[in-house]
Amino acid sequence: MGLDITEAQKLWDPMPGWLDSASYGLPPRPAFEALQSALADWRVGRTSWRPWNDSTARARAAFAAMMGVAAQDVAVGATVSQMLAPVASSLPPGSRVVAPEEEFTSNLFPWAVSADLRTVPMDRLADAVDAGTRVVAFSLVQSADGRVAPIDDILAAARTHDALVCVDASQACGWLPVDASRFDVLVCGAYKWLMAPRGASYGYLSPRARAVSRPTAANWFAADDPFAAFYGPPLRLAEDARAFDLSPAWFCQVGAAPALELLNEIGVEAVHTYNTALAARFLTALDREPTGSAIVTVDVPGAEERLNAAGIRTSVRAGKVRASFHLYSTEDDVDQAVKALTG
């Protein structure tokens, strides 16, 4: 039995009006306190770095469980673009990559510097995949407006033409149930819906993807036995996805592990139901159709100024106000935002 949303919400301390989890998530108290404790130990040299490092294994395991994959198929990194770079840089010269033209640039630039990148509107992405396509790259949920990608159509087209499927799940993991094994590569920046400190990212790298990629940032932590790989040759990388690890940012992992473990305890399905209900409440009150996403946009004259004046924190993307609802958001937050936009 998972932890009830109502009980779980007692583990957060948000100021009213935070509707911008698509920019960054708020840490649960266990994650914040673990980070504060580690920082206090660091300040005075109270402990070895090994306990901080151990948080990496916990976070990796929690992310793998959330994604429905094995921990040995998950790499640890810092950012989305860094985790995509080994795949992109390993493509043969002239390889064609297709992606949505609306895509966030962290899932465009790595391909653009290494391949023949072609962009099309999201609703035409599946049709753009052909026999010459090497990679299909897209976000499961678009950052600008919260649209959920037509995953089944894109996957069917990619499989027909044997193209790798590489997805950015930063705006999905933590609220949208995801089976990472459906993709060749899935990467996620953990500071949004996973509510970790910025500097922790995780990626599922399938055996197929690993076979055609080079670990271009190989380091001691990517070794088969990191604690026996401090000095000297030969190259001795792990045989699984750990070969693509970066040496972890300790304090980011210290904060990440409790947050991911708590999400698993609550259950992403429950978070999805809660978040999308709040988003639907918001859109319905503004006479708009619910979209099924936890991220929504509205085009209301003076919206940004009205929301700011009411103490409601959102973002502006592509000229529209973007609101995003997570498990620490409340119906009162929604109603206050609607009041600001309609009053």
Image (spheres, helix red, strand yellow):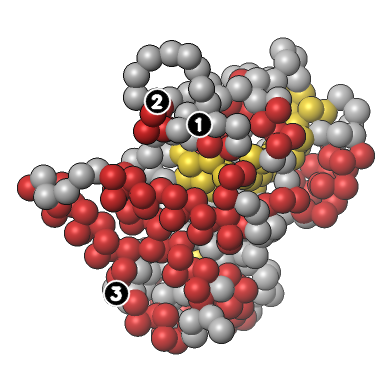
The picture places residue 290, in percent across and down from the top left corner, at: 67, 74
Amino acid carrying label 2: it is Ala
The secondary structure type at the circle numbered 2 is loop
Identity of the residue drawn at 65% across and 59% down: 68
* Disc 3 to disc 1: CB gap under 8 Å: no
Where, by quadrant of the figure, is residue 66 drawn?
Answer: bottom right
Q: Earlier in the sequence, mark 1 or mark 2?
A: 1
Residue underneath mark 1:
224
Residue lying furthest front in this view?
228
Query: Quadrant location of the C terminus?
Result: bottom left
Amino acid carrying label 1: it is Asp
The picture places residue 150, in percent across and down from the top left corner, at: 78, 54
Q: Earlier in the sequence, mark 3 or mark 1?
A: 3
The secondary structure type at the circle numbered 1 is loop
Q: Which mark is residue 229?
A: 2
The secondary structure type at the circle numbered 3 is loop
Identity of the residue drawn at 34% across and 24% down: 230
Residue underneath mark 3:
13
- Give the Cα separation between the discs numbered 1 and 2: 8 Å
Q: Is residue 331 rendered to the left or right of residue 294?
A: left
Residue lying furthest left in this view?
44
Where, by quadrant of the figure, is residue 258 drawn?
Answer: bottom left
The picture places residue 282, in percent across and down from the top left corner, at: 55, 77
* Disc 1 to disc 2: CB gap under 8 Å: yes
Q: Tag 2: Cα neighbours inside 10 Å, few (<14), some, or many (≥20)?
A: some
Picture layout, residue 95 above or below residue 202: above
Amino acid carrying label 3: it is Asp
The picture places residue 14, in percent across and down from the top left corner, at: 31, 73
